[in-house]
Structures are given as structure tokens and as C-alpha cells.
Image (cartoon, helix red, strand yellow):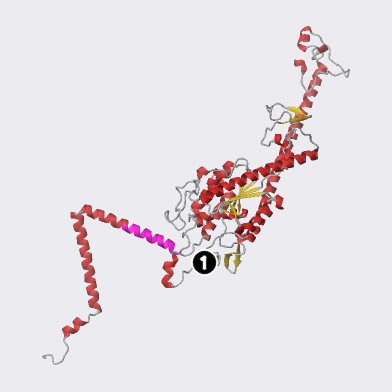
Amino acid sequence: GGNHGKPSLSSSSSSSSSPLDMFTTAGYALCSAVSYAYAYTIYSYHHRRTEFVLFCVLLACSLLAISGKLGGSSGNSRGRGYHNPAILHDWSQISSALDLKLGSIDHWCLRGGDDQCRCEDPLTPSARSETRTWGAAHGRNKKAIAEAVQKQKDAVVTAQAAADAAAGKGWSSGLYENDLDDGVEWYEDGYQDDWTFDNTDYDALGRADGGSASDASNLPVLDVVFLGDSITEQRAGKFFGKETEKFRKAAHVFRKTYDRDSGGKYDGLALGIAGDTAPNLLWRIMHGEMPDDLNPRIWWITVGTNDLGATQCSEEVTLLGILRVVEEILNRKPDSHIVINSILPMSQEKSGILEINGKRPRHHGGRRGRRKKEASAGPTDFWPSIKAVNKQLQKFADKHKSVKFFDATEIFTEKVGNRLVINHDLIEDGVHPTPSGYKKWDAEIVKRIDSIESKDDDGKKAAAADAKAAADAAAAAAAEKQQADMDAAAADDVTDDAYDSYDRGYDDVYYDDLAVAADWDGDGDGDDDWLYAGQDTDDW
């Protein structure tokens, strides 16, 4: 009542705090916390030093683990592969599989790190033993190889027999073949039997001789063998080794191109298994899919899609896996040509977009509230990684004479304004070609095979011409020397009347002792008939 109705100052100030008071309180609390922490740290360091050091180590490890997790999340946050698709090491100069080293790999997984993928050792052959159908498909591939090799042998027999008939060559009676194959030259029906000294079974041919090199050069051969994954397997109309109606049209395209009996320009064989990576293909060729009697002119490799897409291997690991396969073929088939097909364009986007103005497109995860959650599960942008691997494969092929690189990018992509997109008429699911895609692809492959065959033939012709020229030059030099020696011997015969050779038909040594000097001129032409081939027979 003594305030006469005036409000109390104390109650007013307690009911509302000014910003200055709040700042002062927060500063006091912060200073108190820092002081307490400092005091506790000093106390712990002096009186509980062991516990303090262990606490610091634990704190540092926890911070490193958290930062690593955040780093991995930031790598995944764009949801489109590792942030740096560049391959750091130059593998183009290697000369064997021994030059491939795992220790220099920066990261194994496409999104970064080494643990967030199913990537295998790219240098070690790996069988997919967890899939029973894979083993069955591998067995069917080996059966297809045996059939192709037998077909080639039958074609050789037929072609050789036709060539012999056209040339009017004889046939052996076959009475002694397979009984006396001891290296002795037998003359059956007037023709020499070579007794199968090379890889051609001339006994099976029924030939009386082995034939000439010119005949053998015209015999049928297997031109190309395709090695790879499902992209290659679909060429044969198969899925895990079994013929499938879905891929029947693709198989028809393959036969029309790589089967001479069906009108194709070349003979080819497709050996692929769905889902295979480079280590899986390496295992297959080391276990029956590259036998000694399978010797095409060209090995065509299409692998790497599953290394990036299925097992999520990094670009460098994918590259090493492909190069390991190439080096294995070079070691097993050093006289063959190898073509490395580029990894085909691949996209998880329905639009098939790969680039905008030469740069990767920006992908959006939806509404703002869901962007962070959806980004980690968003589509992977494989295209920068594919380009990085293909660039290194091209570089490797440029430095190896028997290896070629075939870039199929322009076949399956098209420009739409400023965007590079996959042509959906040629690739149906973002990965596998359509029958139309295979047809367009094969047309370009045939052109490349033509180029390789032409250069190969030109090289063989040039080598043959060089060999013939060298032989002609050697023969001319030998003839010139022979004539010179004969001229010199004739001159000696004119001046040496005492000891010409074989006087009176007896040994010159005997008549040298008796000093009989009479030339032997049997035909009366005035020349010593015992001087031949430039040899001075007086020395006898």
C-alpha cells in the first residue's frame, strides 16, 4: 500500500531480461565451462596421466572415424560415383602381366574407399562358384568351341580336297600310312608322302603329299572370337548358356554377319556369360575357353561393364582387370590380333542423358526435405568413369602393335541439342544393345576387321616379296661367284699342262707321283672335262 499503486521495480526486472543480461549469462557459463575443462585437464595430466593420454587417443580415433564416415557420405551424397574418375597411374607401357601392381591403387571402390563394394582382385582369375548356372554356361561355351574347331577342320579337309582335285593331284593308296610313320619318305603311287609333320592331319585328308604353302593360305580359318559378358553372350542368342527367345533376333544378326554358311563375310564365335567381370573372363580363358587348337585371327574383348556397374570397382581396378585379360591372351596367342572394345555407354537415367555441354548433368533427388535421403540412393553416373577407362585403353593399344582399340561410343550415342544421350533405339535398357544396335555395331566391326585383314595381308605380301628378293640376290651372287671361279680355273688349265686332274681316268695323286701330264678331254672339245663348278681339281 505504501507504493501508492506504482509497480515494483524488482518484480519488473525479474519478469523480463534484457539481451545484455542474456549475453552476460551465456558468456559466464561458457567461461565457467572452459575454466572447468582447463582445470580438469591440468589435474588429469598431473595426477592421472595414463587415463588422460588414453582419453586423448580415444577422442582422436573417434574424430577420425566420424570424419571418415562424413567423407564417405559426402562422396555418396552426389549419388553418382567417385568424385575423381581420373586414373592416376600410367599402365600403357607394361609388357607383361608381371608389370601390373595392386599396391599403387588409390581406391578400390567406385564411390571411394576400399570397403563399400564387392570388387575382387583384378589380377587373379575368379570363378563364380556361387552360381551353378555359371558353371553350366562355361561348359556350354567349351562345347561350342569344340564344335567350331571341328567345323573348321572339316572345312579344311573339304577345301584341300577340292583344291587337289582342281590341280589334278594324286591320292595315296593308304596302304602304309599310320603303320610306318617313321620319317622315311615313301613314294606311293608316284607321290611323296610327308607323313604329317605339321599340325594338319594329311592322313585324314588321304593326300599323297602335304601340299604347298600357297594351298594352305587359302584354307578356311576362324576369323574372330568375341569374349565378354552378357553383351557378348546375347550375340549367340543365349542367357547363361541357354538359347533364349528374347535374344533370337540378336543371334540372327550375328549369324548373318559371322557365319559364312549363312551369308556372312567372316566366321566368328561368341563366348560370353551374363554378369561376368574381367577376373571371371580371365578364369574362363585359363580353364578351357582358349584351347591350343582355337586360333582365330582376331580376339575381340568386350568386358568392364559389370566391373563398374555390378561390383562397383573403381576405374583403375577395372582397367587393371581388362589389361590382365589382354596380357593373358598375348602370352597364349602371340601371333593373333587383339581388339579391345570400349566399354559401352551405360546410364541408369530413363532419359539416357550422359553429358550436357561436355559436362556431367546435375541430378535432382526430388523435394528439398527428401534431397539428402534420396541423394545417397540416387542413380550412379557411370559415364565419367567409362570415359576414363576407355581413354587409358586407347593409350595402351596405341603403344602395342598387335593390340587395337575400337571406340563404339558414337555408334550408341547421339547429340540432342547440347546433350549427349544414349540412343534408345540401339540400347534398350541402358546397358544392352538391341538387335538394331548389334546390326549397326557389327557393320562397323566388319570394317575394322577388313582393315586388319588388309594390313595383315599387305604385311605378308611385303615379307614374301622381301624374302624372294633376298633369295634372288643371293642366287645371283652365287652364280656370279661360280662363273668367276670357273673362269679362273679355266685360266689355270691353260698354263698348267703338267698336272691336270684325273689324267687318263686315274686319281690325280697317283699321276702326280708319276709326273704324267695328259689332259682328260673325253668329248674332244679342248677343255678339261674334270673342271666343274669352279673347283680347281688340280689341287686334288
**Where does the image place residue 316, in percent across and percent down from the top left?**
49, 52
Nearer to the camera, 59 or 441: 441
In the image, farthest residue toward the bottom:
4
Q: Nearer the viewer, residue 193 or 249?
A: 249
Magenta-span inclusion, residue 321: no
Q: Main secondary structure of the magenta part?
A: helix
Q: Residue at x 50, y 56 (%)?
A: 310
Q: Quadrant of the C terminus?
A: top right
| Extent of the magenta region | 62-78
Q: Secondary structure at mark 1?
A: loop
Q: Check if residue 64 falls in the magenta segment.
A: yes
Can residue 490 be seen?
A: yes
Please state which amino acid type lies under the numbered disc 1.
Pro
- Residue position marked by numbered label 1 in the rendering: 361
Q: Is residue 321 left or right of residue 444?
A: left
Q: Quadrant of residue 210?
A: top right
